[in-house]
Amino acid sequence: MNCTRRRLLGYAAAGAGLSLVPRAWTGTAAQAIEGCATQGAFTIPLAASGERVALGTETLALRATSHHDALAFVAGGVRNPALVAAAGMTASVDLVNALGEPTTVHWHGLSVDTRNDGNGEAPVAPGATYRYTFPIRNRSGLYWYHPHPHGATARQVNRGLFGTFEVEDDDELALRRALPVVVGETQLTLVLTDRRTGDGDRYAPAPEDELLGWYGCVPHVNGILRPYHDVARTAYRLRILNASNARTYRLAFRDDAGNAMPFHLAGTDGGLLEQAVRCDEVLLSPAERADLVVDFAGLAQGRYVTFETRAFAPMQDVPRAAIDAVHAHAPVTSSLPDGAPFDLMQFRVRGAAGRPVSMPQRLARLPPIATSDEDRPLRLGFAKGRWRINDRVYDMDTTAIDVPTGAAETWLLRNYHTSAPHAMHLHGFQFRVVARETSPEQVVSMAVDDRGRLPTDLGLKDTVLVWPGESVRIAIDFRTPYPDAQVYLVHCHNLEHEDAGMMLRVRVG
Ligand code: C2O
Ligand code: CU
């Protein structure tokens, strides 16, 4: 299967819809913001996203700690470890809260019960320890962990409190053998965040940040500004996590002749696709993951490839009154809006000619999509100064959505026209995207099937971006192994939207 190659409207060209947005990308003006630049030299070598720490039979102590403004989870001296677990095992992790404030660990994408979901409704007090123990029910994939104390999630994640969580199973090991790739050498995890420069990088959101989301102006990969990495002339598997508070990336590769370099999408949030999809680009909204295979075999020694995010229209068409209200405050400096193009990192091709990649025909099997006759509507919009789902905001004492035991449900995520893109995340379950309807042109042009789906819609998902004016239908299998009812959350993963209450409780069972 191929992604279409139709060009999207450039960010600047798409400016007509941006009249209500306070700052539009204009290139030169944006470059003038001190220290902010969408391009620059690649001078620092890439580092690993985190040292790998395999979970075993013993409980892992994970300390949430702070050092000045920076926060980290530390396990036996390893900062923000890249946790690795085998499918079927039982994970046991002690959160030791050495912060001066409450926190939790949410295992993003993993199928756990409420007790182990770290959803913020029972925060772990400073000085306290909480044991998470749960069987690994998910397929192989790149999941992640981060705090979820309501109202403080955005700040704690932004200050560095998160890590990746890999699940391994037979499909995963088979793919590594087939490509072949070696973890840490030709298989890399790349975590995307955006930062601000100078004092602006301390997390102190202005009203505009709280309304639209916190956007930086310099992109980081594994915590490094525009790193480079020497690569051999062979296939690389790049597992990407978008850990940014609010920024969406339109990821692509560009060779040194300026040509787009196609790649394969092998997996999404919940693991491998059935078949890899050949793509020129993928969209990755906050919390989403993409599993990419890029082949450097065809490039001569000494050439280089830039990993970039291309321009797109941010479509933050929030009501005039809300914009006027934030304009009454000092403007945010050291920030570039969603959709600004950035060079993220550079791959430098080294060494002797290698073998081109042979992508296996079938990567994995996905469970069949089970839909219901009736949709459950979730309307996403802005009213009375807040982002809302079905006109409601989060209330710990109210369960907005009740799902009967074992139901298969179809949810219709409908975003209003006067809105912003919302990266909708459901705890505890992976879902399937059934269709996208009334999508904006820049999304339509990336669709790969007659249901309007994007390449990243073809696998298991726990987070899906819904654009203004768009409806996304998702199918969720709510069967659980738990004897009693469990409470989960559905929310926008733009962390400022989430902390401001764009979140509802979901009771299952
Ligand atoms: Cu990654 Cu409720 O979040
Ligand atoms: Cu949102």
Image: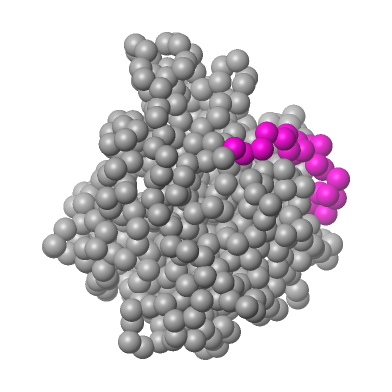
- Is 246 situated above or below 99? above
Q: Please indicate whether residue 354 sits to the left or right of residue 326 in the image.
A: left
| The N terminus sits in image quarter | top right
Furthest residue in direction left, as rendered: 58
Residue 9 on the magenta span: yes
Q: Determine the residue positioned at 22% across, 66% down.
A: 90
Horizontal and vertical percent for residue 12? 78, 37
Residue 50 visible from this viewpoint: yes
Residue drawn at (31%, 47%), measured in percent from left and top? Answer: 172
Place residue 494 in its image quadrant.
Answer: bottom right
Q: Nearer the viewer, residue 153 or 163?
A: 163
Give the left or right position of residue 314, taking residue 506 as reference: right
Q: Is residue 165 visible?
A: no
Q: Is residue 177 left or right of residue 68?
A: left
Looking at the rendering, in which quadrant would you find the C terminus? bottom left
Query: In x, y percent, where is residue 273?
Result: 45, 49
Residue visible at 75% across and 74% down? 383
Between residues 245 and 232, which one lies in front from this camera angle?
232
Q: Percent x, y for residue 101?
A: 39, 69
For the image, the number of numbered tags is 0
Q: Is residue 107 above or below residue 184?
A: below
Q: Position of residue 304 (x, y in %)?
A: 49, 18
Foreground residue among 374 and 240: 374
Identify whether 376 is placed above or below 429. below
Residue 338's place in the image compared with 429, above or below, is: above
Q: Main secondary structure of the magenta part?
A: loop
Magenta range is 2-23
